[in-house]
Amino acid sequence: MIIDIINKKRLGKELSYKEIAYFFNAYLEGEIKDYQMSSLLMAICINGMTDEEVYALTKVFIDSGDILDFSSFCDVSVDKHSTGGIGDKTTLIIAPIVAACGVTVVKMSGRGLGYTGGTIDKLESIPGFRIDLTDEEIIKQVKDIGVVITGQTKNLAPMDKAIYALRDVTGTVSSIPLIASSIMSKKIASGADKILIDIKVGNGALLRTKKDAQKLSQLMKRIGEIYNREVRTIISDMNTPLGYNIGNSLEVLEAMEILQGKEKNNNLVDLCLELASEMVSMGKNISINDAYMEVVEVIKNGSAYNKFLELVKHQKGKIDKLSLAPYRKLMKSKHKGTIKGINALELGKLSVSIGAGRINKEDKIDYGVGIKLSKLVGEKVKKGEVLGVIYVNDRIKMPNTDDIFDIE
């Protein structure tokens, strides 16, 4: 039956709910091996799935574990998810902002997929930070401070957790059906009433075209309707990295600077303000403009940053122990001119090559390595001027800056 199901999808035929449930449940129980599941995932990636297959897969993921319920003490829980991008540390920024505005945020995050960084990997760069909260601990923290960011618990969508790790190392991360079922199963299982999805598009994202992003958007909204969840989506650019920093500890530091109001007027700040405003609008049922005013105010008065520190403290993190790799390598401009583009994908590849991401499922991440850009798109540079700094623990082959920076 295992081979029959793989071959059926390889030939582009529709799988039944029974076949999907059998195959994925057997994998979770260890009866089906990694190489067999990898074959099915690749067939799905190549041939796609019908909406009915996606609904079935989402249900199987959700039913593999528990579903949290905050309705007894929380009117509305709002969650946000990004499909992943280079330098995307938005969750670290907007979760404290939205919570500081009085909207409950329960965020179940994942690890990096492909060249895109994962929120859980970034948080684990904070020494002691616990990402393995139990269902009971999640509920208690929501009651205490109104915000929690955790990895998938043992009992929440465990099926997705297992598949997620395998997709990362088998070239199957960009499948729209797999992305949709993964995201929506986590959001529904974690008790979110309203869900905001940031769909990244570009060479540094899982999706390369706006058409695919719109397809994913509509699919997730249809899944939301089935489970009576309000789903909003934003499609954002990922041809250029978000902000200045790429790499786990570096991205935490940049998030802290933005929460303290130290960074202004760049693509990361603008996106965070947009996402946070949408979430506050959903949570409070107010206009985007009114929500935006609240978001700006909690950054200005320091309550958003204080909420971040509160979050870290509750999850046992020691933010003062955050560390960076000791050696610095400078990327310098070979030309004089204006930066017309910064290739997000090349920077993503570079960050993984120095240890900031995984190539194999078992790889350990080096939290202190990464890249800090000195210049962003639109800025003028002189020949020999520093474009960015690479943080490493040992010697590396310096990249060709012409592959990363388009300077005219």
Image (spheres, helix red, strand yellow):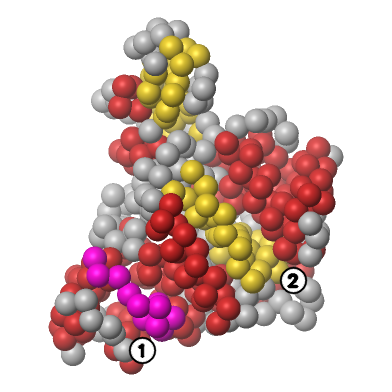
Residue at image mark 2 = 76
Q: Nearer the viewer, residue 92 or 124?
A: 92
Say which quarter of the image contains residue 3. bottom left
Residue 239 rendering spot, x and y as whole percentages? 42, 39
Task: Relative to 71, say whether 196 is above or below.
Answer: above
Q: Residue at x 40, y 83 (%)?
A: 52
Considering only order in the chain, which callout, 1 or 2, is on the residue closer to the N terminus?
Answer: 1
Residue 150 visible somewhere in the drawing = no
Q: Is residue 110 among the parts visible in the rendering? A: yes
Look at the image and say whether residue 22 sits in the magenta stretch. Answer: no
Residue drawn 75% across and 53% down?
288
The one nearer the camera, 335 or 330, is 335
Tell me the chief SS of the magenta region.
Answer: helix
Disc 2 residue crowd, few under 14, some 14–19, many 20+, Cα 10 Å: some
Report x, y in % for residue 178.
Answer: 37, 68
Q: Amino acid at mark 1?
A: Tyr
Q: Which residue is mark 1?
A: 17
Give the image location of residue 230, x and y in percent. 64, 71
Q: Please state the extent of the stretch shown in magenta in the rendering.
A: 46-57
Horizontal arrangement in the rendering, residue 203 relative to residue 248 (left or right): left
Disc 2 from disc 1: Cα separation: 32 Å
Q: Secondary structure at mark 1?
A: helix
Amino acid type of the residue that numbered disc 2 sits on in the rendered structure: Val
